[in-house]
């Protein structure tokens, strides 16, 4: 016979496992790390198809890397199209962690939204956001064209 305490303990373990599983699945489904070839020193070319994973699921953002850039770029789907952000914190240049809703700095806790706007300090400058153009199944990120 199960006591009330055992029931609560079992329920809590089950809830914890469910929450952990949903967080793990969420992070797998919503993002993908992609390595692209830098077409020239000022542009990155990302196939739109990278937003669909092997299971046919739509991803909400990508983390784009190249063998030549010293930093990564996040590429979010937003209402107006795409938002490409340099994944470097404007407070003290730490690499940022991206998730489906925001970008978080592991050094001092600054947070930014998908458009690169500061949500939480100590950073007080928005992220570097690049101009983006979608054409012929590709998204071009213009590294020399910074949006204001
Ligand atoms: S370097 Fe990002 S908050 Fe300080």
Image (cartoon, rainbow, N blue to C red):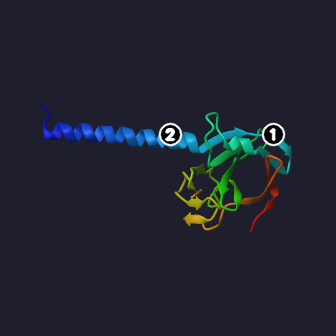
79 above or below 73? Answer: below
Q: Residue 109: x, y in percent?
A: 52, 57
Count of labels shown?
A: 2
Q: CA distance from mark 1 to mark 2?
A: 28 Å
Q: Nearer the viewer, residue 30 or 110?
A: 30
Q: Determine the residue positioned at 16% across, 40% down.
A: 5
23 above or below 145? Answer: above
Question: Which numbered tag is attached to residue 25?
Answer: 2
Mark 2 surroundings within 10 Å by alpha-carbon count, few (fewer than 14), some (14 through 19), many (20 or more): few
Question: Which numbered tag is attached to residue 37?
Answer: 1
Q: Nearer the viewer, residue 82 or 136?
A: 136
**Which image quadrant: the C terminus?**
bottom right
Q: Residue 99: x, y in percent?
A: 56, 50
> Which SS class for mark 1?
loop
Which quadrant of the figure has residue 133?
bottom right
Q: Determine the residue positioned at 62% across, 45% down.
A: 59
Q: Residue 28: x, y in percent?
A: 55, 39
């Amino acid at each position: 016979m199960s006591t009330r305490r055992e029931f609560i303990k079992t329920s809590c373990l089950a809830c914890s496992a469910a929450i952990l599983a949903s967080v793990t699945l969420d992070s797998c489904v919503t993002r993908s790390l992609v390595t692209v070839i830098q077409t020239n020193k000022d542009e990155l070319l990302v196939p739109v198809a990278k937003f669909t994973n092997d299971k046919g699921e739509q991803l909400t953002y990508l983390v784009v890397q190249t063998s030549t850039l010293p930093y990564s770029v996040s590429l979010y789907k937003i209402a107006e199209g795409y938002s490409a952000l340099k994944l470097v914190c404007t407070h003290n240049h730490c690499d940022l962690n991206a998730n489906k809703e925001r970008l978080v700095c592991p050094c001092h806790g600054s947070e930014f939204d998908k458009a690169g706007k500061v949500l939480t300090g100590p950073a007080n400058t928005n992220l570097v956001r690049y101009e983006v153009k979608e054409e012929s199944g590709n998204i071009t990120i213009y590294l020399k064209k910074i949006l204001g």
